[in-house]
Amino acid sequence: AQTVTQSQPEMSVQEAETVTLSCTYDTSESDYYLFWYKQPPSRQMILVIRQEAYKQQNATENRFSVNFQKAAKSFSLKISDSQLGDAAMYFCAYRRIQGAQKLVFGQGTRLTINP
Amino acid sequence: DVKVTQSSRYLVKRTGEKVFLECVQDMDHENMFWYRQDPGLGLRLIYFSYDVKMKEKGDIPEGYSVSREKKERFSLILESASTNQTSMYLCASSDIFTGENTQYFGPGTRLTVL
């Protein structure tokens, strides 16, 4: 069974600085998807960024980028120029390519932005 | 924009009650999911459905059942609520045809069982 581990329950960063959230996963599959989701306080969970395992290039979405290390089974999220609105729970998630489309989530990392 | 709505944001029930949590999506998605979110455990899949009247067990189906009579609606049922089912419940939907594979989430229902 696939597992996803986020070893940092909480992180904090000064506004305008850069922070990296860690995620590791375990799978025997060669192709899969990885995601970072953001859950702001009392608000809906939204997709931040997505990575297909067969793509060598790291995904980027504006201030958000990932460092995808397939051999190490690592998928970290870098947030540049942190803003107060980035404060949220961040979840790393895994999904197989084939079969059921369920997501396997990590435990989450609570990110605090200090003004 | 994809919209996933859940019938209640907060719900308080008593032990032994039958509880219905409703989820509706407006994007004609085939897949719908129910997750449970607990601190330190992340989200865990309870049940999912890939078509009307179809359902499959997720990782923690015990104590729950589901119903999908219409494509847009997916209900989670707690037949006899227990205190260990106090949690945040999140519904999600996704489209299997676009290849996007993104799940869109509802706002969640925080259920307290007394």
Image: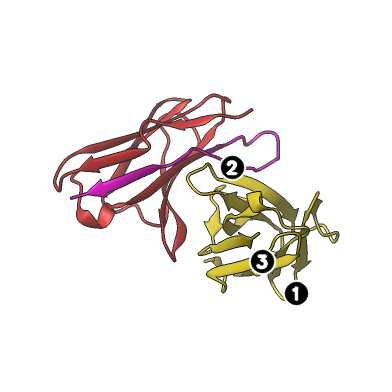
Q: Which of marks 3 and 2 is in front?
A: 3
- According to the colouring, which chain is yellow? A
Q: Mark 2 lies on which chain?
A: B
Q: Inspect this view and state whether residue A7 appears.
A: yes
Three-letter amino acid code at the position of disc 1? Ala
Callout 1: helix, strand or loop? Answer: loop
Is the image coloured rainbow, by chain, by secondary structure, or in one colour? by chain
Three-letter amino acid code at the position of disc 2? Gln
Q: Mark 1 lies on which chain?
A: A
Q: Residue B103 shows which numbered tag? A: 2
For the residues labelled 3 and 2, the Cα–Cα distance comes to 28 Å
| Among the 4 quarters of the image, the one containing residue B90 | top left
Classify 10 Å Cα crowding around label 1: few (below 14), some (14-19), many (20 and above).
Answer: few
- In this rendered view, identify the residue nearer to me: A84 or A76: A84
**In contact (CB < 8 Å): disc 3 and disc 1:** no
| Among the 4 quarters of the image, the one containing residue A18 | bottom right
Residue labelled with disc 3:
A13
Q: Inspect this view and state whether residue B77 appears.
A: no
Residue A115 colored in magenta in the image: no
B10, above or below A59, in the image: above
Could you tell me which residue is drawn at 20 percent across and 47 percent down? B81
Residue numbers of the magenta segment: B93-114
Residue B111 colored in magenta in the image: yes
Judged left or right of residue B90, residue B3 is right
Residue labelled with disc 1:
A71
**In contact (CB < 8 Å): disc 3 and disc 2:** no
Three-letter amino acid code at the position of disc 3? Val
For the residues labelled 3 and 1, the Cα–Cα distance comes to 29 Å
Colour in which chain B is drawn: red
Residue A78: % across, % down: 74, 63
